[in-house]
Image (cartoon, helix red, strand yellow):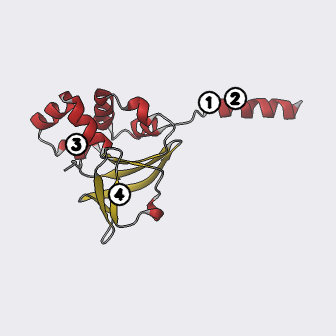
């Protein structure tokens, strides 16, 4: 009887520990509010909740704050440009920090990011400040600047 109760409690605990996708993981972190708003405005939430896997170079709220407010407001209203900018931060596949190599990496947007590894990892000049935030459908690496496609 005790084993049955223990198994029931474990089953309930497993149900309560819902899987977290990239969007839920970023929202739970608390410092990606602007990114979450931008993903919603661009209609990309469902994509990043999809099966993936994706590697997301996620700019923090502080990174978005570096963009002049008028420019950021205009970007949030221009769905096509916003989509291009956001998908430029996403690479297909799950690339963990230990697997990052210097060079060009093709993004979901279609252009290539330049990854440098000397003196810390940078992506198009944006410094990677935290790595390997694992989600069920990929991984997030935090960057300190919003990178723009050329």
Q: Residues within 10 Å of mark 3 (few under 14, many from 20)?
A: some
Q: Quadrant of residue 83?
A: top left
In this view of the protein, which residue sits in the foreground, 102 or 143?
A: 102
> Label 2's element?
helix
Query: Residue 12 — which label?
Result: 2
Query: Residue 64 — which label?
Result: 3
Q: First in sequence, mark 1 or 3: give its number.
A: 1
- State left or right for residue 18 relative to residue 144: right
Query: Residue 105 — which label?
Result: 4
Reply above or below: 117 against 125: below
Label 3 and label 4: CA atoms lie apart by: 22 Å
Q: Residues within 10 Å of mark 1 (few under 14, many from 20)?
A: few
Name which residue lies at 44% across and 60% down. 97
> Label 4's element?
strand
In this view of the protein, which residue sits in the foreground, 42 or 64?
A: 42
Q: Nearer the viewer, mark 2 or mark 3?
A: 3
Q: First in sequence, mark 4 or 1: give its number.
A: 1
Q: Nearer the viewer, mark 4 or mark 1?
A: 4
Q: Nearer the viewer, mark 4 or mark 2?
A: 4
Asked whether the residues under the numbered discs 2 and 1 touch, taking CB atoms below 8 Å apart as contact, a structural biologist would say: yes
Q: Dot 1 corresponds to which residue?
A: 16
Q: Nearer the viewer, mark 1 or mark 3?
A: 3
Q: Position of residue 35 (x, y in %)?
A: 30, 37
Name which residue lies at 29% across and 56% down. 113
Label 4 and label 2: CA atoms lie apart by: 42 Å
Q: First in sequence, mark 3 or 4: give its number.
A: 3
Label 2 and label 3: CA atoms lie apart by: 40 Å
């Amino acid at each position: 009887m005790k084993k049955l109760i223990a198994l029931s409690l474990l089953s309930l605990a497993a149900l309560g520990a819902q899987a977290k996708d990239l969007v839920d993981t970023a929202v739970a972190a608390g410092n990606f509010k602007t990114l979450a708003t931008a993903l919603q405005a661009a209609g990309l939430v469902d994509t990043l909740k999809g099966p993936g896997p994706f590697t997301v170079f996620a700019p923090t709220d502080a990174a978005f704050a570096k963009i002049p407010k008028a420019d950021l407001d205009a970007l949030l209203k221009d769905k096509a440009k916003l989509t291009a900018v956001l998908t430029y931060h996403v690479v297909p596949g799950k690339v963990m920090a230990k697997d990052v190599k210097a060079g060009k990496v093709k993004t979901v947007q279609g252009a290539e990011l330049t990854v440098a590894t000397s003196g810390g990892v940078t992506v198009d000049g944006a410094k990677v400040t935290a790595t390997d935030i694992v989600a069920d459908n990929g991984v997030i690496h935090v960057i300190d600047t919003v990178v723009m496609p050329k």
